[in-house]
Image (cartoon, rainbow, N blue to C red):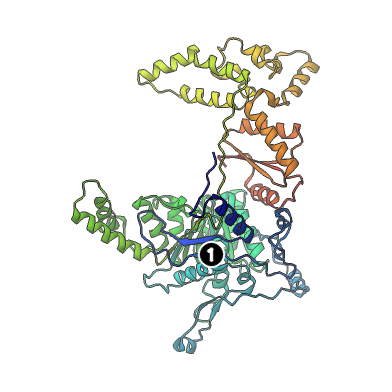
Amino acid sequence: MMRRVANKQGEGEAQDAGAQNRAQGRVCLIRAPVMPMLMCDAGPKIVFKPFVSPCLDAVDLSRRAPELRLKTLGVPLFRKKLTGLAPVNAAALAAAATEEKKEEPPCDKPPLVLWEPDEEAKEKGGQPVVVDVMLTRFLREHQRFGVKFVFECLMGLKEVGGNGCILADDMGLGKSLQSLSVMWTLLKQGLDGRPAVRKAVVVCPASLVSNWGNELDKWLQGKCPYTAVLEGGSEKVAQIFKSFKYDQRSLVLIASYETFRMHVEKLEGAPVDLVICDEAHKLKNDKTRTAQAINSIQTPRRLLLSGTPIQNDLDEFFSLVSLCNPALFGDQNAFRKTYANPILAGREPDATDAQQARAQHRLAELSEMTNQFILRRTNEILAKVLPPKLMLNVFIRLTPAQEHLYRHFLGSSATAKLLRQSDEGKVTNQALAAIQALAKLCNHPQLVENRRQNELKDCEGVDEILGPCVPGLGQGGARGVRDREERRGIMEVRKQTRPELSGKMLFLHNLLSSIRRNTDDKVVIISNYTQTLDMIENFSKEFRFPCVRLDGSTSRTKRGKLVKTFNEAPPKGNQFLFLLSSKV
């Protein structure tokens, strides 16, 4: 299935315009509400201009993508991290400070001034707050606006009061860069000429801890010492939290939600003046221990990041807003009485005109208030701006072996028993197990090789069907073979995936072979089942498709490194396939 976007110019003109704008790197952005029922002034559309690298060795965007992926835009990638335990080597620091620095290319963008002091503020020592040029050179138009918006919220310059902000831009619009720009600015500057933030804490899902460290290294060029809390024993993590509290050099603590919740008391009394919560939609219940742990940090400056819009659930909306600006609406009962109940009553099918009018009034009031500290921009995809999005749903026909097993199962006594139980209102776990077994069968017959543990054990002729797929099946597997050499041979043959026995695997083999041979693309394969990933991994090794794998057994310390290595790997290199479990 392919979805295309057409306009009044006609399909041909739209296709030409899309190709032209794709080559020029133009994207149209508009502001949108964080929740569908709220209202928001879209404001002027921001159309990205063609990106021009500020580096001396700038790369022309018209070049091929593989060449672009090899460029770093002049940003050196520092990988050294503080552990919070290692002593500071003063001699090494002094030597590093005197090293000859790489000459920075001139920045052709105007300075990003976030605040200008008036005469009264100047008399008190106030100075203009300006974003560091090392960040300004990379900020695009919408990001400059976002940085200024977030800064004004965190510094309490908005009329609504409070010092919190929710940045809810669509994925890919640079929320991390915007938040890092504000954080670094506040760590170095303030309205009174002194830093507004002494220390900052970044809380995120465990899989993103390493990624945040990489972002700090990349954009701040190693100038911001930080402590990234990765996996370790409870005592070691507790010591890292305590060390961060007293470490004058480390400015930022990065920890997962779970780790932060377990050790937040170690930060009591620490000079933390800013908390950044990534993937903040996970905090939509303010009664959870994680939300309570974040509330325990005595700082009003809280920045929530989320690319997932909230559905029309006012309770979830209240949870996020109250975490961001706790004093704005009071408790939940007051919020429900003033806003939630009138709005929901006016949306009922049998609502009176008076109820609808009151709902609109409350909705407009709520929107006006929250739009002062919530910023969400979306990609407005137009035919003239972007090429049409291509989505393909490919339906693969089962092989004869798969079809025989599938049909036999549907007519088996096990299925008849499940149907009888369903008619009697009895729901058992066997139904879900049967569905999972059939799903695995559709992937490959080998995934149902152990007949004693699945619903295909009564299938007549299963040994004849699965025999070529799974040698030794009828003898209880390889363990039923006494001869050591024969048993070893069976295990070796089992590593052969035999894609011709599975419609999906045969299609995957042909597709990957074509991509590998004719393009420089890399491929991500996602599956719900680790057994399927095992098979695809063996399949990749058998047909020499370089692959890397990330699933629940991958340690948290390695996850970020695997993703980073795969993204930075050159075309046609040893990083072609990325096998990913959907549950990670």
Which residue shows up at 67% across the image and 67% down it? 53
Judge left or right: residue 80 versus residue 400: right
Judge left or right: residue 280 versus residue 495: left
- Give the amino acid at mark 1: Val
The quadrant holding residue 494 is: top right
The quadrant holding residue 360 is: bottom left
Residue 507, image x and y in percent? 65, 31
SS of the residue at dot 1? strand
Residue 542, image x and y in percent? 75, 31
The quadrant holding residue 70 is: bottom right
Q: Nearer the viewer, residue 543 or 60?
A: 60
Give the residue number, with chain letter if any, for mark 1. 47
Q: Is residue 563 above or below residue 121?
A: above
Q: Is residue 487 above or below residue 77?
A: above
Residue at the extreme right: 485
Judge left or right: residue 387 versus residue 367: right
Residue 451, image x and y in percent? 60, 17
Which residue shows up at 78% across the image and 20% down it? 489
Q: Nearer the viewer, residue 419 or 200?
A: 419
